[in-house]
Image (cartoon, rainbow, N blue to C red):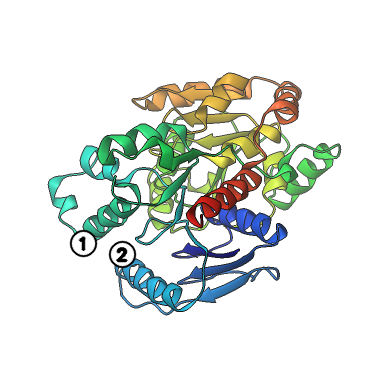
Amino acid sequence: MNLAFAVFKYFPFGGMQKNMLAIAKECAQRGHQVVIYTGEWQGEIVPELDVKILPVKGISNHQRNRSFSEALQKTIQREHVDLVVGFNKMPGLDVYYAGDSCFAAKAYEDRSFLYRMTGRCKMSLAFERAVFAKESISNILLVSRAERAAYVKYYQTQDDRIFPLPPGISRQCIMSSDAQAIRESIRRDLDVAEDEHVFLALGSGFRTKGLDRSIQMLAALPASLKTRLIVVGQDKNSAFVSLAKKLGVDIKVCFLGGRGDVPALLQGADVLLHPAYRENTGNVLLEAMIAGLPVVVTDVCGYAHYVESAKMGHVLPSPFCLSEYTSVVQKILQVSRDEWQGIGKLFADNADIYHRPKRAAELIETIAGYRND
């Protein structure tokens, strides 16, 4: 088959982008021709995949996204494509990988009338409607079971167009036999003292993932507790640097940018902090768990139920409470690293969390089959 994968922008440290690449590789390994169309590509090009960067116009993100969608439609019309697989919501998709939460729920439940009058909101709602509305023919690969109800509520999306996917976590984060040596090495590189507790905030999208909450929590901890917050991800950080300075903890907060050594960072940390405001899934939660790292997460995250069922940390209930967050983190630190590693190993050995790319490729083949019948 000739498959067209479409994504507005690719950068190597985005969770959705990583999943796209894994699914594209799986499809290519099955003998399919995969072309990735994007408006911008950062990082190295994968040799086994064909990447085509389409010309886009516009100053704002939503203008560029609309331009990309229009350019994609023109390009697809000129080329023989069996299936168009989108990783952002846009018109003309045969398959949509639902890596984002329901935009309509956010627009109507969390934002004001004035927000819904903006060009960005109107375009985002129109693009989402093109995928999920009853009259659409797009099939949906759903990664978060929690989001299904929201899409059905706002668009009455038919059940037979929705295909659930399991998680697809890379096994490279599983704690290895030399975990202690890796921990000592990465903490040395980061100049971490032996008695210093390291909190890790992992992932791009600092605002959505609740980085402000973690900085506030850091400031609320007892001064006698030696702590550091390591922030890894590709995003603007000026507002969070200002917040840390205002609260007097800027010396304890370190922004590393996007990094390729996540497995080592997971071993070097003591707790993964993920007090998100909204999170469709949260692959980083599972990556931390199989690395033996306890997780503190809010209940709005799609994968928070894994943390709760495995007892690999703590799930904070809504509404969010800073004092509870601070108290929970201190309790997490009182449990030995060996105990967390034991729980993490059990989870890594038994949880079905590694097969998303394979299942997605199977579904793409199935959908293509009945589309062409």
Question: 337 or 117, which is in the foreground?
Answer: 117
Image marks 2 and 1: residues in contact by CB distance under 8 Å: yes
| Quarter of the image where the N terminus is located | bottom right
Query: Is residue 334 depicted above or below 296 in this figure?
Result: above
Judging from the image, what secondary structure is the residue with disc 2 in? helix
Taking depth in this image into account, of 367 and 121 the one nearest to the observer is: 367
Expressed as whole percent of the image width and height from the top left, the position of residue 282 reads 52, 39
Q: Which residue is mark 1?
A: 119
**Residue lying at 67% horizontally and 59% vertically, measured from the top left:** 25
Label 1 residue SS: helix
Label 1 crowd bin: few (<14), some (14–19), many (20+), radius 10 Å: few
Residue 169 in picture, x, y percent from top left: 65, 42
Residue behind mark 2 = 62
| Amino acid, disc 1 | Gly
Q: Name above or below for residue 237 compared with residue 263.
A: below
Q: CA distance from mark 2 to mark 1?
A: 8 Å
Precedes in sequence: disc 2 or disc 1: 2
Counting from the top left corner in percent of width and height, residue 173 is at: 71, 42
Inspect this view and state whether residue 366 appears.
yes
36, 349: nearer the viewer:
36
Farthest residue toward the front?
Answer: 373
Q: Residue at x 15, y 55 (%)?
A: 117
